[in-house]
Structure formats: C-alpha cells, structure tokens
Amino acid sequence: MKNKNTAYLYLLITFFAWGSLYVVSKFVLGKIPIITISFLRYVIAGIILMLLLKQRKLKRIEKQDYKCIFSIGFFGYFVAIGAQLLGTKLSNASLASLVNSMNPIVIMLFAIFILKEKLTATKIICGVLAIIGVYIIVGGVDGSNQFLGISISIFSVFLWSYVSVIIRKITQKYDSLQITTYGIIIAAICTMPFSLWELMVTPNVQFDKSVILSMLYIGGVCTAVAHVLWNKSLSLMEAGACSLFYPLQPMVAVLLGWVFLGENISMNFILGGLLITSGVLFSILREKDTRPTLKSTRNFS
C-alpha cells in the first residue's frame, strides 16, 4: 500500500508537469524549430539525470536488454515525443491534449496483450469517467483544417503507449532513474544531427529570455522530473492503473492556459474536471482495497 500511495503522488506531479508542457511550449514554438526543442530539453534533462545517477550504485545492463532500452530512447523519447510537439504546433494545445486523452485506453490494451494485465471493472469505470470529462472540457474546440496535426498526435499516442508498457516491463528489472537517463541520452544523440540541420535551414531563430526560461522548465521539470516519476510509477503499479491519471493532463493544460495564455474557462471545464477527479479518486479508493499485482510482470526480462 505504501508503494501505491507513493505512486499516486508521483503520478499527480507527473501529469501536472506534462499538462503544463502544452502551455509552456507555446512560448517556444515558432521561435525555435521543433526538433531543436526536443534536443535542448534532452540535453538539459540528461545533464540533471546524469548528476543524480552518479550518486547511485547501478545494476549492469544485460546484453539482451540493450534493444529494449534503445527502443525506449528512440521510439519513445525521440519519435513519439517529437511527434507530440509537432502535433501541438499543427493543431493547438486543447486539441492535442484531447487526443492525448486516448492514452489510458491504448496503454490498457497494450498492457493486456503484452503484460497480461487484467481489464478490471474499476479500470473501465475510471477510464470512461475520465474520457467523458476530457471531452466535456475540450470537446467544443474547433478542429477544422487541423487534420495533419491531429493525425500526428494520434500516432504519438499509440507509440508512446507501447513504449510505456515496455518501460513497465524493464523497470521490474532495473532502476527507473537508470532507464530514464539512458533513454534520454539516446534521444539526445538521435536528435542532435537533425537539430543542427534544422538550425542551418531555419531563418529567424530566437533565443530570447522567455525561450531560455521555458526550455529550462521543459528540460528540468517536464522531462527530467516528470519522466523519472512516470517510470518509477510504472515500476510500482500496473501500466493500466497508472494510465488512469492521464486525463488530469488536459485538465491542467486548460487551467494553466486560462491563467497564462488568457484562454477562456467555462462550466464545461468545471463539470469535466469533476468527472476526471471523480475517476481518479475512484481508482485510488478501489485500489486501496486490492493487493499489489506485480506477479504477472516480474518474470519478464
């Protein structure tokens, strides 16, 4: 139970950080190119994580697990998150967060087939409540002429959901900070040549004060802190249970968009927020009545 309570706290911090990413990225998008944003966030996060990693005694990565860790760094941090940023740029923060609300369903499906997790009534009820809440909050936005951005965001959701299941699997064997650091370093290496090319062909790149502060926040909080806590949560709880917190992300995005970007907030937000919060609280209360279920994944390697 102590592990689950810790995971709940980690998940709340994680999704507040990820929700704020949609808003903070708006201060950066248009001033510096997409891939360069990813490269800088990984460099900043990588430096922070490597400093933390030096203080730990680590288990040596076995040769057969190299492919898994590379997949996390390349397909998860490099491709999926890069696609998420591009989807946000081509649509808008509300639409991107709405598409991202598909994550609980997709993660649960991958977890059922790959990790053999059970699809419980609690997960179904919480997922339905949360998804309805998300649609009420941002379902009224205009999605016309944004098909490409939405399509890229959907691709990002499926790829990231698959990678999250892989993370759940590998963090049963290795330290979550170790896995996150290696994945971030791989992503930084992958993005570097594309970033250099992007900077050479993109005119009017701006590195003003707002960009620098935003990148420090994106790299330190939205990347280093959030991804370590997400990976740690996946090591403590089932992937499907962790995914039920995903709908908090668009709720935070809309709330912070109202505070910092002057976006309107309506009764739909209040009603949707109540449904999302109810779904998460129901999940927590129900999980307290059950024992941890890690047996189904401990034998993976």
Image (cartoon, rainbow, N blue to C red):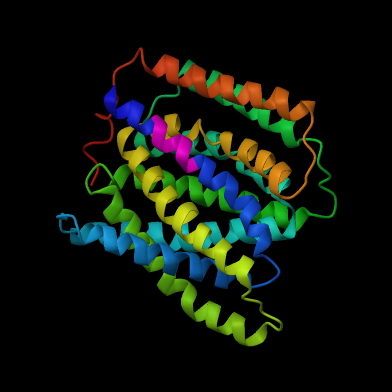
Quarter-of-image position of residue 253 = top right
Q: Residue furthest front?
A: 209
Percent from the top left, x then y, of residue 268? 77, 27
Please indicate whether residue 275 sits to the left or right of residue 54 in the image. right
* Span of residues in magenta: 8-14
Q: Which residue does the image show at 44% across and 65% down from the upper left?
A: 42
Q: Is 242 situated above or below 142?
A: above
* Residue closer to the observer: 221 or 115: 221
Which SS does the magenta portion mostly show? helix
* Residue closer to the observer: 284 or 125: 284
Please indicate whether residue 121 sits to the left or right of residue 117 in the image. right
Quarter-of-image position of residue 134 = top right
Count of marks placed on residues? 0
Q: Is 125 situated above or below 149?
A: above
* Residue closer to the observer: 296 or 4: 4
Percent from the top left, x then y, of residue 162? 46, 47
Q: Which residue does the image show at 61% across and 70% down from the upper left?
A: 209
